[in-house]
Amino acid sequence: MSFHSTAAQLVTLAAEGEQHGGNHNSLNPAVTGGCALIILLLLLWITTRFNRDR
C-alpha cells in the first residue's frame, strides 16, 4: 500500500465522519467535564495520601 492511497483512504474516512457531526446526542459537555474533574481530583487525593513522606 502506497502513501498516496493510504492518505486518500484516510481523507475519505474523515469526510464520512463530518456528515454525522461527531457528537452523540446523550453526551453533555458539562456533565462530561464535571465527571472528568471529579475523577482527576479523586486521583490527586489518592496520590497525596500515598505520598506522606513529603
Image: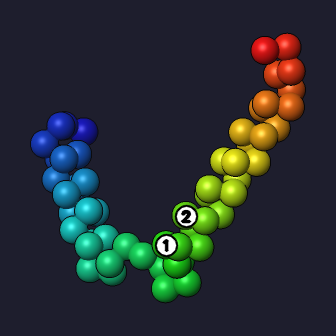
Amino acid type of the residue tagged 2 in the rendering: Gly
Q: Which mark is residue 40?
A: none
The residue beneath circle 2 is 33
The residue beneath circle 1 is 29
Residue 2 percent across, percent down from the top left: 19, 37
Residue 43 percent across, percent down from the top left: 74, 42
Query: As drawn, which residue projects farthest toward the top?
Result: 53
Whether the residues at callouts 2 and 1 have beta carbons within 8 Å, the answer is yes
Task: Please tell me whether mark 2 sits on a helix, a strand or a loop.
Answer: helix
Q: How is the image coloured?
A: rainbow
In the image, taking residue 4 as reference, residue 19 lies left or right, namely: right
Residue at the location (32% across, 78% down)?
21
Q: Is 29 located above or below residue 50 in the figure?
A: below
Residue closer to the observer: 43 or 10:
43
Residue 30 percent across, percent down from the top left: 53, 73
In the image, taking residue 45 as reference, residue 28 lies left or right, namely: left
Amino acid type of the residue tagged 1 in the rendering: Pro
Residue density around tag 2, few if under 14, some if 14–19, many if 20 or more, within 10 Å: few
Residue density around tag 1, few if under 14, some if 14–19, many if 20 or more, within 10 Å: few
Residue at the location (31% across, 70% down)?
17
In the image, taking residue 43 as reference, residue 37 lies left or right, namely: left
Q: Is 52 located above or below residue 18 in the figure?
A: above
Residue at the location (28% across, 63% down)?
13
Pick the quarter of the image with the N terminus: top left
Quadrant position of residue 47 = top right
Query: As drawn, which residue projects farthest toward the left?
Result: 4
**Measured Cα–Cα span from mark 2 to mark 1:** 6 Å
